[in-house]
């Protein structure tokens, strides 16, 4: 009997010591990101015995309690919802960030492309009252130089935005590849580890942390195998596997000549297009296209403005009676736009019929709805509307992500009040088990003293 008591007490001390250590682990990691609460599963311990004679029923003798396994709190549906919200927030954030950069490059103040082109036209209007005045002619050329300089600066700024998006996409792709490689190693470790141990739960924590990091970059569907290994496929594309327990792919970024980005995946020696509907990479690919559109719009505006202005100049004569020379050289694109004349006498203010300010008055016809000013205003306002929408989307996505993470944290998070209650309960059970051992020893000593 005392031997049974010793076994019962010993098993209780061992089981409750394990439970107390898990509580200590929970409390220590209560603020650790990605840590999921652990819980010890206790079960009745016993031994089977009985007579060897098959006609007797085998009996089960109670032998205390044992820590059967360490379970990890988890909800696959809430985890999937949190990952989807994380991906949406990543895409929305990237769009809002880079649309803001585009808006900064475009500008909308007195030094913007539209404002300075308008200032050039206004100096021509002022010159029309005194068309032979060299000071006014020089002011017109100065205004044109400022407008051309702003166009060059804007083109250069948009080019830097495009380069920044490309660099950010490369960093994200490198981070994605690093996470995939690390997750492949975790898959190997999970296949070798014994389930139900604290070490196995730690591997699951690392697995899910890596999956969360991957889903921030690109939207994925996740499948967890029997041994806890993860298989990742591109969301909405079941045939495109990013990672399975046996293999993984390499993700890269391809850039077109106009700066547009696309994603590629290398798997088994074959390269294919990698579609991305959500995640930071999807947002960057989207913004590379938007930036390319803005650059193309600026190039078209520059070419048309130079063509129209040169045609206007050719229709008039300068102060010396010569045919008007080209005023702008747009052969190098917006990035290298240059004023082609420097002599104020070369401004073709006079019309072909001899009217001294006739050609200057005709210049106002270039300021219509299809003119450079109106087109620039359309570019800026279109980007502003897109940015406002992106900011609203980012705010909504952040709220949804926070709510999804909070719902997930209700399952996996550590509640210190609950841990305190469990700590008290297991301490009392531990003390009771120790008391059983003490009683067994005292009983044994009493029996020995009888002899």
Image (cartoon, helix red, strand yellow):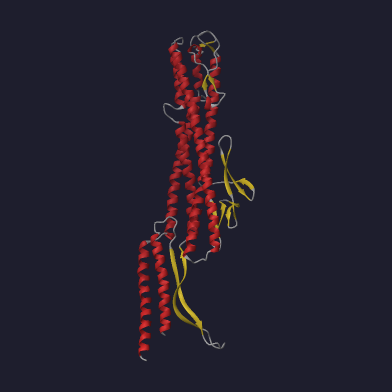
What is the number of callouts on the image? Answer: 0
- Residue 352 in which image quadrant: top right
Residue 158 higher or lower than 284, as above or below: above
Residue at point 40% right, 70% down? 17
Residue at point 39%, 64% (across, down): 24
Residue 133 location, quadrant: top left
Instruction: Say if residue 177 shows up in the picture.
Output: yes
Give the side of residue 226 with respect to residue 113, left or right: right
Q: In the rendered image, which quarter contains the C terminus?
A: bottom left
**Placement of 413 over or under 304, stated as above or below:** below
Q: Is the N terminus in the top left, top right, bottom left or bottom right quadrant?
A: bottom left
Q: Is residue 329 left or right of residue 116?
A: right
Residue at the spot 53% in from the left edge and 30% down from the top edge: 297
Residue 150, x across and y down, in percent:
47, 26
Tell which of 10 and 56 is nearer to you. 10
User: Is residue 218 visible to us here?
Assistant: no
In the rendering, at what x and y percent does residue 306 appear?
A: 54, 22
Foreground residue, 376 or 209?
A: 209
Q: Which residue ends up furthest to the bottom in the rendered image?
A: 451
Q: Is residue 354 above or below residue 213?
A: above
Q: State whether residue 378 is above or below residue 166.
A: above
Q: Where is residue 118 shown, x and y percent of the image?
A: 45, 22
Residue 51 on image: x %, y %: 53, 87
């Amino acid at each position: 009997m005392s031997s049974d008591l010793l076994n019962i007490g010993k098993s209780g001390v061992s089981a409750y010591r394990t439970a107390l250590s898990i509580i200590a682990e929970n409390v220590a990691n209560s603020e650790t990101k990605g840590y999921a609460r652990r819980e010890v599963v206790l079960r009745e311990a016993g031994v089977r015995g009985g007579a060897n004679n098959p006609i007797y029923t085998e009996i089960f003798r109670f032998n205390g309690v044992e820590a059967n396994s360490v379970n990890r709190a988890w909800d696959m549906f809430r985890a999937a919802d949190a990952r989807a919200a994380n991906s949406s927030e990543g895409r929305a954030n990237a769009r809002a960030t880079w649309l803001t950069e585009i808006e900064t490059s475009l500008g909308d103040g007195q030094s913007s492309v539209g404002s300075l082109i308008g200032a050039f036209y206004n100096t021509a209007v002022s010159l029309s009252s005194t068309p032979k005045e060299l000071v006014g002619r020089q002011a017109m050329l100065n205004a044109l130089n400022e407008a051309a300089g702003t166009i060059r600066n804007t083109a250069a700024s948009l080019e830097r935005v495009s380069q920044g998006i490309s660099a950010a996409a490369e960093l994200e792709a490198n981070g994605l590849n690093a996470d995939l490689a690390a997750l492949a190693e975790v898959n190997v470790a999970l296949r070798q580890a014994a389930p139900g141990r604290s070490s196995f739960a730690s591997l699951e924590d690392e697995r899910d942390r890596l999956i969360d990091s991957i889903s921030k970059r690109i939207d994925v569907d996740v499948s967890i195998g029997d041994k806890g290994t993860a298989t990742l496929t591109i969301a909405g594309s079941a045939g495109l596997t990013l990672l399975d327990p046996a293999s993984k792919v390499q993700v890269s970024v391809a850039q077109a000549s106009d700066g547009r980005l696309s994603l590629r995946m290398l798997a088994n020696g074959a390269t294919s297009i990698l579609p991305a509907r959500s995640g930071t990479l999807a947002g960057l690919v989207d913004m590379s296209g938007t930036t390319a559109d803005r650059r193309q719009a600026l190039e078209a505006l520059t070419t048309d403005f130079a063509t129209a202005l040169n045609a206007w100049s050719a229709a008039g004569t300068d102060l010396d009676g010569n045919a008007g020379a080209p005023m702008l050289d747009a052969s190098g694109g917006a990035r290298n736009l240059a004023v082609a004349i420097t002599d104020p006498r070369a401004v073709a203010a006079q019309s072909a019929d001899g009217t001294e300010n006739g050609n200057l008055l005709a210049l106002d016809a270039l300021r219509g709805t299809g003119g450079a000013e109106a087109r620039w205003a359309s570019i800026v306002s279109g980007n502003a509307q897109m940015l406002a929408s992106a900011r609203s989307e980012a705010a909504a996505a952040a709220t949804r992500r926070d709510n999804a993470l909070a719902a997930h944290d209700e399952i996996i998070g550590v509640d210190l009040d609950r841990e305190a209650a469990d700590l008290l309960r297991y301490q009392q059970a531990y003390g009771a088990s120790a008391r059983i051992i003490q009683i067994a020893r005292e009983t044994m000593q009493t029996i020995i003293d009888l002899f």
